[in-house]
């Protein structure tokens, strides 16, 4: 639950950054924080307190009385897989955003939003 | 059929004589009202003969040439379409069951011809007159139409003959007394139609020579002149049929048309002149309001 | 058939191997790129072809890695996915071709990688069956788009890209959140699996929040108002090739995903979403575009509006309770909308790149030079604006037909938006088609735009075919074939005389085909159109050289669509041909050199009328009877629908409150077309009006009030237009007002709804064709010879054009209704009809109007033909032969009909009988005598009488026998002088100055000004309101959050 709350908080903080900050870099940072929040949320969805990794080890196979792992104790592996993908995507977006900002800076020598309001109405 | 044409010719000749005479009388009366001696009442006959006897006629073009014919045609047409004396073989003319609307439109024919001829003369003043005339026409036709439509609806007919017979049986059956407001509107409109004095800016002898006929002379002018006289008589008869109960014999017709004629002449004699737009505005206000009183009465009935 | 996974895999491989291949050189990379695209395209095409022919019936399911769903990820290619993929790859290929041809500024291989990724991502997005996988593909697509958007020379593209990145990230955050929460609470990521676990009754609480979040993420990508500022910035700032593929393909992918997710999630409020966001987006964008100066942003607004409409359609399709045929219609509407938008809009974006001008005002005259460019641009714009026979029209029609009747307000609002769309699109068209000195060079290849347009034309043909197939509307194949023949005329654009002969041939053939037609209302108008069309088209040849090569095809098209109107058996087919007529006539009017503004007004008014008619027809439909015939029994709404339908006809007739288009459109339209516009086309309004009054208006007490009101409109039209005509100084504008005034009489006749009234209306309809056709044709000839239509510059032409003068004079006499020509009988019939009904005030106004009309009649004759002939016209010749022939034919007709009105009345009698209106009080004896209960009218007698009187006058004249001496034109009594020049004594300007002083309060253009005020008011408002898009990233992001809060709020409050 605490993960859940914390990740929501992170998302909101990130959102706040994207909504309010006037600096392009800060907006990207906001987006990254938001990403992190989501990733944490995904992880927390599969989290089981005191659970084990969802790995059927060779050792456990040979132990007679515990051929299978306690299913209720397994942490859901899927969210973890998803998070990996999400992280990669997040990085890609951040990289893309930063490269755009670099080119924007090279044009106007500024990274303030107020200098980038040509397209409007 | 053929004798009808003969009768028609008779009416035209008679109408012409009468019309010229009325013109002469009018000039005389006006002169007397102005304190002049004035020409003789037969002056118009003399003028006509003089014009006919001219040796050459100047023409400005085809339409100029045709216009007097149109004018004459209009005059003859109107005179022959209105029943002078109802139920008379000769003098009921070519009137027929739906003649009221026809007369209204046929009246334009002569005017149109004259206007076109005037325009073809190439003289700006003669073209100016028709535009004034048409504007003024748009003025006086409104009260006139009010009275005509009012009468048509009231008597359920568009035939002048029926209209006349509906007014028989005593002076009080005349539309003049049955529908006094319509009649007033109609007679005021008539003043405009005759271009009688407050509304005489169309011809406006002082400013623009003599209006449409500026360039006309000799034979052409004589035709215009004849057409105009016939037209005048036709219209007197029309008004007689509309408001004064028509005529059952020739004498009655003479008396009544002469009465209308005198009405026009006396008003002509004493009034100054309106400008075109003043005339139009006048026609669209007082006579219309007066006419509408009866019009609405008929509408409600 | 190719396994869909292979498509994705190959594309992915190709995309990343380009990084290596670039060392082999540019050509190699391009080769790989094109091979991949070709492979992908043919693969999806083969699948789509399978679906289309029915070889594949079920969606193709592919398991990845051999795991069955829900454990493994799987792809599924269904019918629409396959079709959409074809569109995406096609547009993608075109965009790539365009871009490569223009030259990519950034390193080319990188752009190609991004392009491939974009196509791959969107294809995967369409195919995938897994929510998380969907997220991944969305991200691939988005990242590729970010990159592509940023890659433009114009640095503003960077700004657009950055805005897109931020908003896109927020959007994908919601999608991801939704996906994982779905996994948590739905227990699966597989769409089908989740779908089977959800029931609408489970909605509420968490599931609702999750579904909203997920769909909301997609809604952001769908550019819905108020969170679409970034999208507009992309349209404005990014490379047009990129925008073409984004707007034409990728967004459609998002749309499909949205619709599919909504279906799988069984989201119950999809219609509400459509009604709130879709409709708002649609309306807001259509209005915001009005004052847009940047052409790409303008197209952007249009795209956004189309997406709004699509979301609305999806709402109805998924959640509108549509069933059976309605559902099919809506589906077809969606498919057609998507196809229309993809192909038209991408073409338009290509063209913006070919011209390389952003400011709309600089597009002035773009279309003047290049025939092909003009065709491409016009086709796309017409299809976008919903002009028949293009696909956009059928889409709109299906959409309107499918909407349930209780949502009538949606129909009205959508059609309102459509009018707004026409307003700005054709404002643009007005600018592009106007004359200009500007020289334009086409920078780039025109191939992609042409290919797109070719596909669009094919699709238009198909969609029209499907429309008739599904609605089972009967349409004459002969007619369609002849319309097709118009294209042949189009091809023969190089030879004007050939076009002319072909046009006449088609019309004669049509006349031959329909020669045995039954004379009822339809038959009467059919003959009227064809005979009149034949006569008037005959006269067009000399003047046609001034106009574009598309003059004759459009002319034939408009005449044949009038035939279609007359042949229509249902309201809906009448509407289709009505629109065809309006649009083709618009395009013709637009060819007049000064007619750009005028034709725009005409089009907008026509559109208002046409869409009013459509909404009226919509009210008539009920249940399975989607295409009501004329005789369908009057329903609850029929008074309202009668009024709505009537609006269209009133506008085409240009009667009093909606007359504002008439003067300029008549005045500035091509001289060859004006006679047809006035004589025939405006009469289609008459046809429709009779149809409406007879079949739709229930004959009850309050309908008589409506009819009286109509008659009053007609009478006031007749009066005021006649008055206005007197003050015009342009000959065609005088005649324009005159036409409108005459149509006013016809309207009175219709409103009388009696046998006399209809006879008067029909008689006058034909009569008006005769004399107004004559006058306009003569004027066309005069303008052709003198080169001016300004009355004060003419004068004295009787000396040069005696034949024309004679014909013109007869036309004027007929117009004025002076016996003995044919005009009087019409007046007589009408007045008798009015007397019969005792409509005194109408009668008064009508008669008075005809008196007022004398003013302009005289003005025309005088200023053109009489007075002084100018020196510069001394050598002017008589009008060209075809025109002279037509003049004489029509003059002969007016004489013949004047003597023998039965030439027309025989026909109109049959019509009146077939309408069931042959009441007492009107009889018609012999060939010349018409009898009403007020009297009778004998045309023959009158003719003989008039001719006789004329002969008497002539004989008298020759008896007098004076010598006639002809003098020169300047030889006038002029205060003892001879005037210097004809100009100095010609009285030709402002003839009725005195009258104007009398009526000045009445002749100020009150209606025109109030229309202008309303238009300017709206325009100023939307110009201000579009500042909503501040261009500020934070604001854009804020609106996203506000919208989300708003959605949650209304769900929380239970407003739905």
Image (cartoon, coloured by chain):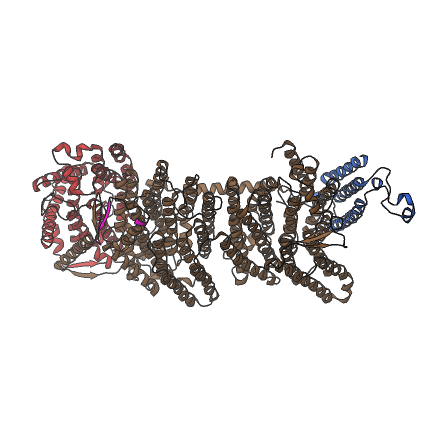
* x, y percent for residue C447: 60, 63
Q: Is residue C642 visible?
A: yes
- Numbered-mark total: 0
* x, y percent for residue B278: 29, 38
Q: Residue furthest front?
A: A64
**C437 left or right, relative to A54:** left
Q: Is residue B269 above or below residue C153?
A: above
Q: Is residue A2 above or below residue C91?
A: above
User: Is C845 or C1017 nearer to us in this picture?
Assistant: C845
Q: Is residue C915 magenta?
A: yes
Identify the colour of chain B in the image: red
**C333 left or right, relative to C856:** right
Q: Quadrant of the C terminus of chain C?
A: top right
Identify the colour of chain C in the image: brown
User: Is C242 or B21 nearer to us in this picture?
Assistant: C242
User: Is B158 or C957 nearer to us in this picture?
Assistant: B158
* x, y percent for residue C516: 34, 60
**C825 left or right, relative to C176:** left
The magenta span reads C913-932
User: Is C756 or C77 nearer to us in this picture?
Assistant: C77
Q: Quadrant of the N terminus of chain C?
A: bottom right
Q: Is residue C548 magenta?
A: no
Q: Is residue C850 visible?
A: no
Identify the colour of chain A in the image: blue
* x, y percent for residue C237: 65, 51
């Amino acid at each position: 639950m605490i993960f859940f709350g914390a990740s929501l908080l992170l998302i909101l903080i990130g959102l706040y950054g994207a909504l309010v900050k006037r600096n392009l870099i800060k907006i990207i940072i906001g987006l990254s924080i938001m990403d992190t929040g989501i990733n944490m949320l995904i992880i927390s969805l599969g989290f089981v307190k005191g659970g084990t990794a969802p790995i059927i080890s060779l050792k456990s196979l040979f132990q007679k009385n515990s051929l299978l792992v306690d299913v209720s104790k397994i942490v859901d592996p899927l969210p973890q897989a998803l998070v990996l993908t999400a992280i990669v995507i997040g990085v890609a977006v951040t990289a893309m955003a930063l490269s755009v900002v670099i080119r924007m800076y090279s044009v106007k020598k500024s990274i303030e939003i107020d200098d980038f309001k040509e397209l409007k109405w | 059929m053929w004798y009808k044409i003969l009768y028609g010719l008779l009416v035209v000749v008679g109408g012409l004589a009468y019309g010229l005479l009325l013109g002469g009388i009018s000039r005389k009366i006006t002169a007397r009202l102005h304190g002049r001696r004035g020409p003789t009442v037969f002056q118009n006959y003399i003028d006509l003969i003089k014009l006919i006897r001219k040796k050459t006629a100047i023409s400005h073009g085809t339409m100029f040439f045709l216009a007097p014919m149109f004018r004459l045609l209009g005059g003859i047409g109107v005179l022959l379409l209105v029943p002078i004396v109802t139920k008379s073989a000769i003098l009921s003319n070519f009137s027929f069951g739906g003649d009221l609307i026809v007369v209204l439109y046929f009246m334009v024919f002569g005017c149109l011809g004259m206007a076109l001829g005037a325009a073809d003369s190439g003289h700006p003043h003669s073209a100016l007159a028709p535009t004034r005339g048409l504007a003024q026409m748009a003025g006086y036709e409104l009260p006139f139409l009010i009275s005509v439509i009012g009468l048509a609806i009231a008597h359920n007919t568009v035939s002048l003959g029926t209209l006349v017979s509906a007014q028989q049986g005593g002076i009080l059956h005349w539309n003049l007394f049955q529908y006094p407001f319509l009649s007033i509107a109609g007679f005021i409109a008539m003043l405009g139609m005759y271009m009688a004095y407050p509304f005489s800016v169309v011809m406006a002898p002082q400013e623009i020579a003599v209006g449409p006929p500026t360039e006309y002379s000799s034979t052409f002018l004589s035709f215009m002149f004849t057409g105009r006289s016939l037209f005048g008589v036709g219209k007197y008869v029309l008004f007689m049929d509309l408001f004064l109960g028509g005529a059952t014999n020739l004498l009655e017709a003479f008396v009544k048309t002469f009465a209308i004629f005198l009405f026009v002449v006396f008003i002509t004699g004493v009034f100054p002149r309106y400008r075109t737009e003043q005339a139009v505005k006048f026609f669209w206000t007082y006579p219309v309001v007066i006419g509408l009183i009866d019009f609405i009465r008929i509408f409600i009935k | 058939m190719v396994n869909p996974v292979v498509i994705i895999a190959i594309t992915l491989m190709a995309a990343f191997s380009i990084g290596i291949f670039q060392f082999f050189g540019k050509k190699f990379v391009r080769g790989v790129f094109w091979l991949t695209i070709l492979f992908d395209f043919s693969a999806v095409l083969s699948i789509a072809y399978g679906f289309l022919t029915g070889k594949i019936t079920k969606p193709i399911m592919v398991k990845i890695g051999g795991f069955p769903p829900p454990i493994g990820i799987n792809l599924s290619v269904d019918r629409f996915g396959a079709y959409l993929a074809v569109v995406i790859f096609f547009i993608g290929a075109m965009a790539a071709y365009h871009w490569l041809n223009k030259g990519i500024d950034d390193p080319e291989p990188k752009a190609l990688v991004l392009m491939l990724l974009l196509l791959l991502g969107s294809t995967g997005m369409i195919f995938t069956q897994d929510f998380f996988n969907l997220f991944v593909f969305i991200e691939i697509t988005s990242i590729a788009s970010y990159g592509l958007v940023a890659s433009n020379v114009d640095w503003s593209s960077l700004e657009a890209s950055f805005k897109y990145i931020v908003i896109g990230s927020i959007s994908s955050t919601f999608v991801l959140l939704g996906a994982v929460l779905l996994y948590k609470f739905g227990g699966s990521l597989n769409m089908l699996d989740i779908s089977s676990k959800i029931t609408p009754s489970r909605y509420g609480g968490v599931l609702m929040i999750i579904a909203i979040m997920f769909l909301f993420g997609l809604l952001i990508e769908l550019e819905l108002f108020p969170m679409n500022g970034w999208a507009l910035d992309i349209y404005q700032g990014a490379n047009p090739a990129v925008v073409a593929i984004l707007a034409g393909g990728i967004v459609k992918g998002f749309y499909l995903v949205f619709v599919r997710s909504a279906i799988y999630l069984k989201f119950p409020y999809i219609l509400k979403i459509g009604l709130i966001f879709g409709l708002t987006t649609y309306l807001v964008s259509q209005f915001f575009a009005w004052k847009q100066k940047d052409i790409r942003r303008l197209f952007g607004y249009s795209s956004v509006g189309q997406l709004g409409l699509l979301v609305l359609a999806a709402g109805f399709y998924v959640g509108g309770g549509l069933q059976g045929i309605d559902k099919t219609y809506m589906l077809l509407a969606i498919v057609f909308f998507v196809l229309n938008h993809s192909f038209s809009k991408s073409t338009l974006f290509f063209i913006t790149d070919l011209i390389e001008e952003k400011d709309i005002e600089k597009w002035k005259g773009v279309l003047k030079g290049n025939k092909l460019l003009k065709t491409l641009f016009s086709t796309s714009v017409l299809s976008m604006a919903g002009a028949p026979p293009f696909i956009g029209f059928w889409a709109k029609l299906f959409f309107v037909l499918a909407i349930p009747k209780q949502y009538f307000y949606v129909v009205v609002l959508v059609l309102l938006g459509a009018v707004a769309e026409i307003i700005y699109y054709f404002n643009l068209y007005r600018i592009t088609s106007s004359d200009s000195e500007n020289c334009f060079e086409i920078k780039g290849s025109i191939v992609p735009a042409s290919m797109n347009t070719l596909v669009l034309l094919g699709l238009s043909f198909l969609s029209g075919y499907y429309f008739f197939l599904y609605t089972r509307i009967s349409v004459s194949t002969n007619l369609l074939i002849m319309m097709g023949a118009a294209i042949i005329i189009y091809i023969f654009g190089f030879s004007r005389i050939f076009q002319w002969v072909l046009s006449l041939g088609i019309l004669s053939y049509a006349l031959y085909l329909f020669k045995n037609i039954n004379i009822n209302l339809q038959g009467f108008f059919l003959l009227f159109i064809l005979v009149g069309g034949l006569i008037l088209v005959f006269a067009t040849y000399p003047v046609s050289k001034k106009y574009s090569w598309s003059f004759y095809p459009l002319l034939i098209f408009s005449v044949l669509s009038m035939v279609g109107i007359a042949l229509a058996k249902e309201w809906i087919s009448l509407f289709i041909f009505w629109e065809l007529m309006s649009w083709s006539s618009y395009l013709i009017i637009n060819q007049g050199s000064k007619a750009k503004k005028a034709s725009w007004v005409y089009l907008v008014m026509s559109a208002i009328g046409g869409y009013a008619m459509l909404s009226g027809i919509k009210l008539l439909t009920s249940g399975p009877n989607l295409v009501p015939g004329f005789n369908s029994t009057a329903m609850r709404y029929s008074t309202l629908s009668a009024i709505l339908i009537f609006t269209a006809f009133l506008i085409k007739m240009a009667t009093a409150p909606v007359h504002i288009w008439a003067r300029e459109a008549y005045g500035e339209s091509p001289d060859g077309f004006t006679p047809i516009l006035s004589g025939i086309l405006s009469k289609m309004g008459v046809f429709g009006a009779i149809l409406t009054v007879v079949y739709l208006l229930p004959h009850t007490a309050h309908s008589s009030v409506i009819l009286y009101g109509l008659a009053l409109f007609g009478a006031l039209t007749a009066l005021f237009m006649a008055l206005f005509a007197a003050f015009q100084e342009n000959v065609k504008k005088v005649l324009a007002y005159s036409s409108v005034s005459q149509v006013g009489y016809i309207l009175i006749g219709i409103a009388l709804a009696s046998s006399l009234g209809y006879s008067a209306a029909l008689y006058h309809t034909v009569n008006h064709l005769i004399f107004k056709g004559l006058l306009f044709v003569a004027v066309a000839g005069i303008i052709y010879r003198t080169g001016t239509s300004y009355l004060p510059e003419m004068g004295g032409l009787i000396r040069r054009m005696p034949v024309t003068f004679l014909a013109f004079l007869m036309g004027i006499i007929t117009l004025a209704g002076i016996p003995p020509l044919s005009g009087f009988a019409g007046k007589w019939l009408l007045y008798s009809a009015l007397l019969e009904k005792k409509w005194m005030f109408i009668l008064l106004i009508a008669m008075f109007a005809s008196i007022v009309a004398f003013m302009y009649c005289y003005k025309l004759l005088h200023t053109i033909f009489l007075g002084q002939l100018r020196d510069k016209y001394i050598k002017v010749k008589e009008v060209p032969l075809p025109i002279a022939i037509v003049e004489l034919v029509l003059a002969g007709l007016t004489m013949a009909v004047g003597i023998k009105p039965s030439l027309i009345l025989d026909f109109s009698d049959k019509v009146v009988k077939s309408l069931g209106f042959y009441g007492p009080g009107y009889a018609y004896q012999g060939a010349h005598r018409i009898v009403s209960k007020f009297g009778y009218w004998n045309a023959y007698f009158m003719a003989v009488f008039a001719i006789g009187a004329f002969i008497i006058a002539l004989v008298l004249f020759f008896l007098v026998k004076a010598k006639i001496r002809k003098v020169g034109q300047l030889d006038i009594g002029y205060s003892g002088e001879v005037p210097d020049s004809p100009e100095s004594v010609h009285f030709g300007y402002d003839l009725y100055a005195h009258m104007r002083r009398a009526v000045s309060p009445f002749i100020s253009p009150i209606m025109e000004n109030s229309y202008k005020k309303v238009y300017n008011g709206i325009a100023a408002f939307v110009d201000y309101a579009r500042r909503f898009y501040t261009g500020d990233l934070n604001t854009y992001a804020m609106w996203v959050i506000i919208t989300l809060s708003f959605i949650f709020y209304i769900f929380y409050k239970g407003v739905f």
